[in-house]
Image (tube, grey):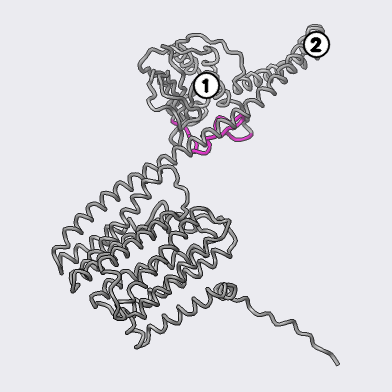
Amino acid sequence: MRTETRPPLVLPAAPTWISTFETAPGWIRWSGAALLGYTLFLLTPTGTQVYGTAASSVASAIRLCIEGAALLWACGREDLPRRFIRSFQVAGWTSLATALNYALLVPPQVGGPTILPASLDATLTVAGYAATLVSLLIYPRAPARPGEHSALAIDTLITTAGLGLLGWSFVTATSADLAASAGAQSFIQSFGVAQLAMIAGLNVVIVRGLAIPSPRAFWWFVSGLAIYLPVIFLTQLNAVGLVPNWPVDIAYYAGVLPTLVACHLVRTDPMTHAGHTGPSWLRDLNPLPLVMPLFVGIALLATLVVGPADKALPLAATLVAISLLLAVRLLLSAHHTAQVGRAEAAREQRRQSDRLKAIGRLAGGIAHEFNNLMARVIGNTELGEASLPPGADARDHFVRARTAALRAADLTSQLLAFSGQQVTRLDIVDAEATVHACYNRAVRGLPAGIVPELQRGNGPYAVFADAAQLSGALEQVLDNAVEAMPQGGRMTLRVGREHVRDGLRLAQLAVPAGDYVVIAVSDTGVGMTAEAAAVACDPFYSTKPAHLGAGLGLASVHGFIAAHSGGLAIESAPGLGTTVRFYLPATT
């Protein structure tokens, strides 16, 4: 008889929130269950009558004691950052102090003496939310990038001003106008101030707060804080009978449940060092400041249409202020973006310069060794040619070998020029005269269809340079310009003295501010892409087909300019031609 073996039944893993509940300490589980049960009780007809009674005050005090104890218990973990511990400690003691505030409301509610006057109660309420704001400002934040402090401060100011004014105008002010007594009005206004504190603190934490110790702990904590905003609004409306009791109670007691979950996760989750878990664009483009003018503008239009008219002026003034701050914020963002772009370009330029220097050192070392070998080859070919009688067939072999060796020796001189190790004879040179001589030599052999032009700018043109190397570099660039115009075009050679005000940064070779003699060669040829222009000075790079070969051309020009402490800039675009500029320091 065959026995069928079945694989063991594998049950699906429990959801994260279930496993979190099962591993939580007993006092958190029982506290959370009690708060959830009391929240559901508030939905019953009997529960809706509890608000404002001694039972309600006692329940609120117990709720705040649970919240404060959870916060203080959470910050007992040793590997938490000091700022995080301070933040939770301030929040925890604030909850316990507020619990005492509710406890002092019980005696008059059961027929005893009034221990806490209404005015003092309102003051303590404001103080409690101010302490909550302090805890949020202490909370660890992601480091601000260069130039970011001002933008983040303006974002917070715009968001707080916009949302705060809307809440004050349509909730706080409306409720205060309907209040039956000065005490009730003071109570409502205290919650209006509290909403400003919560909006400002939440904005800072959500935009820049660090996910400590884990992203889920962070967002559970933020969720618990965010629930206090509707509590604040509903409490003001409830004080004048605009909303019933149960929405206030539901939000008030439900708000502590995410906080309990967050506190448990703070104690148990491994430290992930995840940084900020929000979208990467949130810090650079916070959407709330951008939509604040729209919200305030809609509120202003609604006020002008349906009234009351006395609220129109504050809304209009706030709209103007927010618009001005937003304009400043956008200007700061544009300035910061430009700075980042310039810094990145400068870093790329430094990387390019360092790479060319490294290649130059390698090329210089090879050139020296290769030059010594070629000297022996040339010497021996000359001796071999001289040892043969005139007309001998072998003499042609020696001549061809010597010609190839001389070409190789010329290549080593180009390598030395690229590496900046070529023997340089510096003297005061009239750059205009050198340019004019090179121009005359170039135009004599120009192909048909190329129109040359020589331009002279302001002088004087004196530079401290090696005249022969300057001529060689300029002739190399002129040859490249001619090769770039196989179908003809215009070749322009210009020399002139210029003052570079801000320095030459975005170029193949940068120079500081100062006076320079600038030699520019422009053509209307095929041009190069930005990627090709960026590597045009690399050794043996060429845009020509491979079978036409590639030399050290612009690489040797780069070496010459670098050896003379000058600058080199190449501007090119496909189909629009190329302009190469030498910046040689002008002599006084």
**Location of residue 147 by image quarter:** top left
Nearest the viewer among 333 and 582 is 333
Q: Residue furthest front?
A: 113
* Residue named by callout 1: 561
Q: Is residue 587 left or right of residue 369?
A: left
Question: Is residue 541 a member of the stretch shown in magenta?
Answer: yes
| Tags 1 and 2 touching, CB below 8 Å | no
Nearest the viewer among 244 and 155 is 244
* Residue named by callout 2: 384
Dot 1 or dot 2: first in sequence order is 2
Relative image position of residue 14 (x, y in whole percent): 60, 76
Amino acid type assigned to the residue bearing label 1 in the image:
Ile
For the N terminus, give its image quadrant: bottom right
Whole-angstrom CA distance, mark 1 to mark 2, is 40 Å
SS at mark 1 in the image: helix
By secondary structure, the bulk of the magenta-drawn segment is best described as loop
Nearest the viewer among 340 and 99 is 99
SS at mark 2 in the image: helix
Q: Which region shows up in magenta? A: 524-546
Q: Residue furthest bottom?
A: 1
Relative image position of residue 330 (x, y in whole percent): 33, 48
Q: In the drawing, what numbered circle is on residue 77?
A: none
For the C terminus, give its image quadrant: top left
Amino acid type assigned to the residue bearing label 2 in the image:
Gly
Look at 54% across and 12% down and name the residue there.
468
Circle 1 Cα neighbour tier, 10 Å, few/some/many (<14 / 14–19 / ≥20): many
Circle 2 Cα neighbour tier, 10 Å, few/some/many (<14 / 14–19 / ≥20): some
